[in-house]
Structure formats: C-alpha cells, structure tokens
Image (cartoon, rainbow, N blue to C red):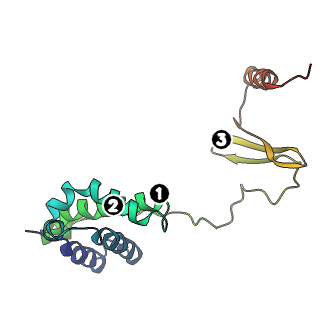
Amino acid sequence: MQKFNDLYDFVDTAVRSRKYPDTTGSSLKVALRLFEAELNEEEQKSIEKLKQNLDQIYQTVVRKNMKEFSASSLATYKSRVVKVLGDFERYGVDPTKMASWSPKLITRARKNAPTSAMPEAAPENTPTAVAVAGTHRIELSLRPDAKDVRFVIIVPQDIQAKESTTIKAVLDSLVKTDK
C-alpha cells in the first residue's frame, strides 16, 4: 500500500532525475505539507484514500488557512497536490516508467520584466493605449478630480467604421441628461 510520505520521495526522485526543476519540486513539497497537516491517520497511510477525500481535505485546508492565503493561492496548492498525485500514479511506482518520462518544459516570462507594450506613466487625464494581441486598450480618466471615474475600452486594431458607430451609439445611450 502506498503512503502519503511516498509522495515526498517521489518528488525528490523526480528532482534528482531532472523530471522537475528544483523550484517546482520545492513548491510541490510545500503544497504537500499544507495538505498533510489536515490528513487523518487513514489518509496518511493510503494514497487511494487521500485521492477519494481530496475535496473534503481541501475544504479543511481552505477553512484553516483562509486568513494566511488567498483563495487563488489555496487553489494553486490543490492543483499542485493533484499534479503530484497524477504524476506519481503514472510514473512513481515503476522505475522504467520514470526513466521514459519526458515532462513538458514551460518557459514563462517574468512578471516584472519591462515590456515595450506598456506605456510610461501617463498624465492623469491623457489616454493610454496598449496594443495586446491585435487589440488596442484605451484607458482615460474622465474626471480629473475623481480617480475612480475611468473609461476603458479594448477594440481590435482593425476596427471597422460600422463597429465604431455602434460603440458611439452605445455610449450615447448611456448618457444621463438633466431635466
């Protein structure tokens, strides 16, 4: 019978055999520790029981950690546990399967890396435009005295005259007139 602690050994083996990068292995083990704290004795002794009760365990993890972590962070931790369980089921028990495992390498851009599409700081009442995947994003502060009153629109770069007319008509219909 496979125990919960076998998952830690699996992650360590996967890191050593370069199936997971070091950082991925560390983040997977953090997620396992977070969930391990909520396991009962039966779930500690049986990965099958853990998989059966994963949703209930997750609810307990959320209740006990909602002040320390955001909902999206807790969901990320759950997805990491699910990933380890899936990979363990596919490759963990059989060394030949582990040897033939070719994980996908995903390269992500850094969040704080400068991008040429992002504008420099613009004055409060001037429009800013950012082209993203064939679109224009235009953001404009409508009232200089109220920072929360903004106009934001995202339109295709090749907007047609008919589409522009439709947008203008929609905006005109929203105007409140004083009587």
In the drawing, what numbered circle is on residue 71?
Answer: 1
Q: CA distance from mark 1 to mark 2?
A: 13 Å
Q: Where residue 123 sits: x, y (%)? A: 88, 55
Viewer-nearest residue: 109 or 171:
171
Circle nearer the viewer, 1 or 3: 1
Left or right relative to 167: residue 38: left
Mark 1 vs 3: CB contact within 8 A? no
Mark sitting earlier along the chain (3/2) = 2
Left or right relative to 29: residue 91: left
Q: Residue shown at 47%/57% (left/top)? A: 71
Q: Residues within 10 Å of mark 3 (few under 14, many from 20)?
A: few
Mark sitting earlier along the chain (1/3) = 1
Disc 1 marks a residue whose amino acid type is Ala
Q: Which residue is mark 3?
A: 134
Mark sitting earlier along the chain (1/2) = 2
Q: Where residue 111 sits: x, y (%)? A: 60, 64
Q: Where residue 162 sits: x, y (%)? A: 74, 19
Q: In the rendered image of this protein, does residue 174 appear above or below residue 114?
A: above
Q: In the rendered image of this protein, does residue 142 appear above or below residue 5?
A: above
Q: Residue shown at 17%/65% (left/top)? A: 43
Viewer-nearest residue: 46 or 25:
46
Q: Which quadrant is the N terminus positioned in?
A: bottom left
Viewer-nearest residue: 85 or 136:
85
Disc 3 marks a residue whose amino acid type is Gly
Query: Element under label 2?
Result: helix
